[in-house]
């Protein structure tokens, strides 16, 4: 059997991968959003850039992207995966708390912006009423795929401006289905037939399908992931994640909604499960790669020749679109009691056009509802405005210093998605030992989250109300997703020696000042854990011996205060022997431990004396 290799079949993929390998590190180095780099690269390498020379020069064909339509079909999944990840960061409860911004401000933005832009098209550009409404609705949309990564990269997604922008974008995603329905209605009306009964049935069918999607997801997703997680195969878990994302997106599209909306609902459903953090780590690489491809495809669709032929009107219209939408969004945000700084930042980010405009305008032109030249001009204007979103994002962030933003956070504290483990203790391994540690922390009113790799343990702990996640804690990304960077302390109780060492090493690399208490197999293992950055390593054999000695001494009548003091002294002797030879660090650690032990001994002696007094009384 022979096989032939055709470079043309893989050329776009190779060009994109090479572009990503250059753009991402370069733009990170110069501290500019890679989004802008992908957009510029797409315009430079697309059919209207270097690709225009592909027919006459072979070298140009090997370094350009000519099949934009083929790339765009795959790139659409970048938005799908992005919305899925956003859904994972939310929950139905948090979404309900955001209803005022989503269904109040978001709906007002779509209605007012679409109406004003449609009026401009009807009275100024002399476009008929139906196409004007459609163009107004398309131009009212903003770019979810660009705005959210810009906010996330600047760590402003959890700020007031980020939540305002996200709420509006979410409502816009919900509005895609009615917008596509409007395209069909105008096409049917143009052909002479479309009744109110048909419209009602179309809407009812779509929303019944969405309700079925949510119900089936709630019923099947958790059992599916429990079954897959029990197998302990990374490849199978990855396949299940991709199946859920793509499957829910496809079902949503079949129901008449956007693929991104279905993926967002799938994320919301999984956000309430114990598999949330592991799913985030698994999906993140796909999301980043496909989003980059999406930005490249948007840039490749920019007709540089058309812009260069008559640039002034196009740039004036693009600036006008940003100005009109920006003023409207700012005014609406102020009406909803948003401070002027976050309102300005949100308005700057949401004022440019969005990727859903391409879908609406393309569909309208395909069925003959919208004249081709109007749709093409609108798509060029939208593309140009998308290019300036990263710059507008930096400008908006500069208007909101941390002190002022902190005041806004107090007013919208109910909407702030707090860090996972902020101020909490993270327990890795929730078997017999980890479960007992959790009980003692709970007794002292110290909040914690737990991580476990055995599904049955996770299921039982969840039923008891423990906030616990299933996943592999030997990965840096997973620990970061669990909020280790904001944690109060880390307790590692897993049995696997190599896994314990890797978790301690990663945690110390992430936060050198983090208190890390780890379970050790024996003295040699404890010494290794101290070298890797553990604050305390507890050898099972030594600790068991000390506890036995403490019990015997107390039972034969030695005063408890003396017993506790001697046990702590012996424990410190062992710690000195097990810790690395860094004298200064060892002395500081020993002194800190002595103070802690003395305080604990004092408290226990006081408690014992109080008990004896009560007995005498």
Image (cartoon, rainbow, N blue to C red):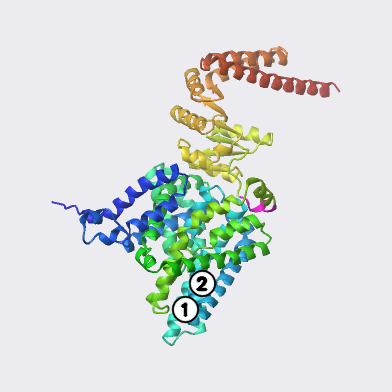
Asked if the stretch drawn in magenta spans residue 415, the answer is yes
Q: Which residue is mark 1?
A: 131
Up the image or down, 407 lies above or below 257; here it is: above
- State whether residue 220 appears in this view: no
Up the image or down, 525 lies above or below 75; here it is: above
- State whether residue 194 appears in this view: yes
Q: CA distance from mark 1 to mark 2?
A: 10 Å
The one of 437 and 406 positioned closer to us in this rendering? 406
Local packing at callout 2 (Cα closer than 10 Å; few below 14, some 14-19, many 20+) is many
Give how far across and how far down residue 270 sits, in percent: 51, 52
Q: Residue at x 51, y 14 (%)?
A: 581
The one of 175 and 129 positioned closer to us in this rendering? 129
Range shown magenta:
411-416
Q: Residue at x 50, y 79 (%)?
A: 199
- Secondary structure mainly formed by the magenta segment: helix
Label 1: element kind: helix
Q: Which residue is mark 2?
A: 137
Give how far across and how far down residue 512 sits, in percent: 54, 29
Q: Residue at x 16, y 52 (%)?
A: 3
Rendered image quadrant of residue 348: bottom right
Where the C terminus falls, by quadrant?
Answer: top right
* Label disc, if present, on residue 424 of the rendered structure: none
Asked if the stretch drawn in magenta spans residue 138, the answer is no
Give how far across and how far down residue 154 sits, in percent: 53, 48
Rendered image quadrant of residue 189: bottom left
The one of 155 and 41 positioned closer to us in this rendering? 41
Image side of residue 364 versus residue 504, left or right:
left
């Amino acid at each position: 059997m022979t096989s032939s290799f055709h470079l043309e079949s893989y050329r776009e993929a190779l060009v994109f991968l090479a572009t990503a390998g250059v753009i991402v590190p370069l733009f990170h180095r110069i501290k500019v959003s890679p989004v802008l780099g992908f957009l510029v690269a797409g315009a430079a390498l697309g059919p209207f850039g270097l690709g225009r020379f592909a027919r006459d020069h072979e070298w140009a064909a090997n370094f350009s992207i000519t099949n934009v339509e083929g790339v765009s079909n795959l790139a659409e999944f970048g938005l799908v995966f992005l919305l899925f990840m956003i859904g994972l960061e939310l929950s139905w409860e948090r979404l309900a708390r955001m209803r005022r911004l989503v269904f109040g401000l978001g709906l007002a933005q779509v209605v007012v912006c679409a109406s004003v832009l449609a009026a401009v098209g009807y009275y100024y550009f002399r476009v008929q009423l139906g196409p004007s409404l459609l163009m107004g609705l398309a131009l009212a949309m903003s770019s979810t795929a660009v705005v959210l990564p810009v906010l996330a990269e600047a760590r402003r997604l959890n700020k007031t401006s980020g939540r305002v922008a996200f709420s509006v974008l979410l409502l816009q995603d919900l509005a895609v289905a009615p917008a596509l329905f409007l395209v069909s209605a105008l096409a049917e009306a143009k052909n002479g037939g479309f009744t109110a009964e048909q419209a009602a049935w179309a809407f009812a069918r779509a929303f019944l399908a969405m309700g079925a999607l949510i119900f089936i997801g709630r019923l099947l997703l958790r059992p599916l992931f429990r079954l897959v997680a029990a197998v302990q195969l990374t490849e199978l878990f990855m396949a299940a994640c991709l199946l859920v994302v793509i499957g829910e997106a496809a079902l949503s599209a079949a129901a008449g909604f956007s693929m991104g909306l279905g993926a967002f609902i799938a994320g919301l459903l999984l956000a309430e499960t114990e598999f949330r953090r592991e799913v985030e780590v698994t999906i993140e690489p796909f999301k980043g790669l496909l989003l980059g491809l999406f930005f490249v495809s948007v840039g490749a669709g920019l007709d540089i020749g058309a812009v260069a032929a008559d640039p002034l009107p196009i740039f004036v219209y693009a600036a006008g679109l940003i100005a009109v939408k920006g003023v409207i969004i700012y005014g609406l945000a102020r009406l909803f009691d948003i401070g002027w700084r976050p309102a300005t930042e949100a308005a700057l980010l949401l004022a440019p056009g969005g990727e859903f405009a391409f879908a609406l305008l393309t569909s309208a032109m395909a069925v003959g509802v919208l004249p081709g030249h109007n749709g093409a001009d609108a798509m060029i204007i939208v593309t140009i405005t998308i290019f300036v979103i990263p710059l507008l994002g930096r400008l908006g962030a500069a208007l909101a210093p941390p002190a002022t933003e902190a005041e806004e956070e107090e007013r919208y504290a109910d909407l702030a998605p707090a860090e996972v483990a902020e101020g909490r203790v993270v327990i890795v391994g929730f078997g017999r030992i980890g479960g007992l540690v959790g009980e003692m922390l709970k007794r002292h009113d110290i909040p914690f989250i737990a991580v476990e790799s055995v599904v049955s343990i996770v299921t039982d702990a969840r039923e008891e109300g423990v906030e616990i996640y299933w996943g592999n804690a030997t990965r840096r990304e997973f620990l970061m997703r669990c909020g280790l960077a904001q944690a109060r302390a880390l307790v590692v109780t897993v049995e696997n020696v190599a896994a314990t060492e890797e978790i301690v090493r990663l945690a110390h690399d992430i936060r050198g000042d983090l208190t890390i208490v780890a379970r050790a197999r024996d003295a040699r293992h404890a010494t290794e854990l101290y070298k890797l950055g553990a604050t305390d390593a507890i050898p099972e054999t030594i600790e068991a011996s000390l506890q036995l000695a403490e019990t015997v001494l107390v039972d034969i009548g030695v005063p408890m205060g003396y017993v506790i003091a001697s046990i702590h002294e012996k424990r410190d002797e062992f710690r000195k022997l097990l810790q690395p030879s860094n004298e200064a660090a060892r002395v500081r650690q020993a002194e800190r431990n002595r103070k802690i032990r003395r305080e604990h001994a004092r408290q226990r002696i006081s408690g014992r004396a109080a008990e004896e007094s009560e007995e005498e009384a």
